[in-house]
Amino acid sequence: ECLKLKEKGVKSLHLRVDAGYGGGIIDALQIDDELIKAFDEYEVFEVHFGSTKTYSQDHYDLVTEMYFEAAESIKGLSIIKPPEPLEIDLCERQYDYRNVSGKTKKKLEQKPDFKKRKKHSPDDGDGFVLARHLLHAGREVIVACATDAAQMPADAHEAWGAWLDAGGDCVPA
């Protein structure tokens, strides 16, 4: 799918991959000769959602901070008919609190606990939160749609619409 972006004139490609997918995928993308040669600028970034490095002192880890920021930013939006998996990921992930050096910090429910409780991985929410985080940081975020919107399964079409409603951009892959 990345090479289809090249055909559409994209010259710079930065991929962000959740480290939870495993180093093998990230390593393979980082050394993919065809992709390296296809783009003037090509980088793969490993995103550590579980990293304890945050910009705020109120959150236990990066994923908690990113979900909190996403929740704050969508308070002023109306996402009409979000796909059920995305709505569950964004609205039903629970929080806990941890005492760290005498300071109480908010901590997002761990992915394995969410998966056990909800019977699916919160991948839709993670993708939305990551894209929103980059958009908010002033980065250009383009979501590449692998199929024509009319051919998307209902939940994918709804997620696509929610991304556009949130101010995102989407190009055909």
Image (cartoon, grey):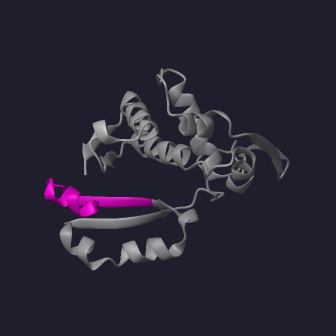
Q: Residue at x 42, y 43 (%)?
A: 137
Which residue is at the front of the view, 29 or 84? 84
Which residue is at the front of the view, 46 or 54? 46
Q: Is residue 144 above or below residue 157?
A: below
Q: Is residue 59 above or below residue 73?
A: below
Q: Residue at x 55, y 70 (%)?
A: 22
Q: Is residue 33 above or below residue 101?
A: below
Which residue is at the front of the view, 150 or 35? 150
Q: Residue at x 52, y 45 (%)?
A: 124
Residue 104 shows up from this direction: no
Q: Position of residue 79 (x, y in %)?
A: 47, 24
- Number of marks drawn: 0
Q: Position of residue 161 (x, y in %)?
A: 38, 31
Q: Position of residue 127 (x, y in %)?
A: 49, 48
Residue 160 shows up from this direction: yes
Q: Position of residue 146 (x, y in %)?
A: 31, 51
In the rendered view, does 71 fall on the left or right side of 118?
left
In the rendered view, does 7 fall on the left or right side of 91?
left
Q: Residue at x 64, y 33 (%)?
A: 91
Asked if residue 90 is among those painted magenta in the image, a careful observer would answer no
Start-end of magenta stretch:
1-16
Asked if residue 4 is among those painted magenta in the image, a careful observer would answer yes
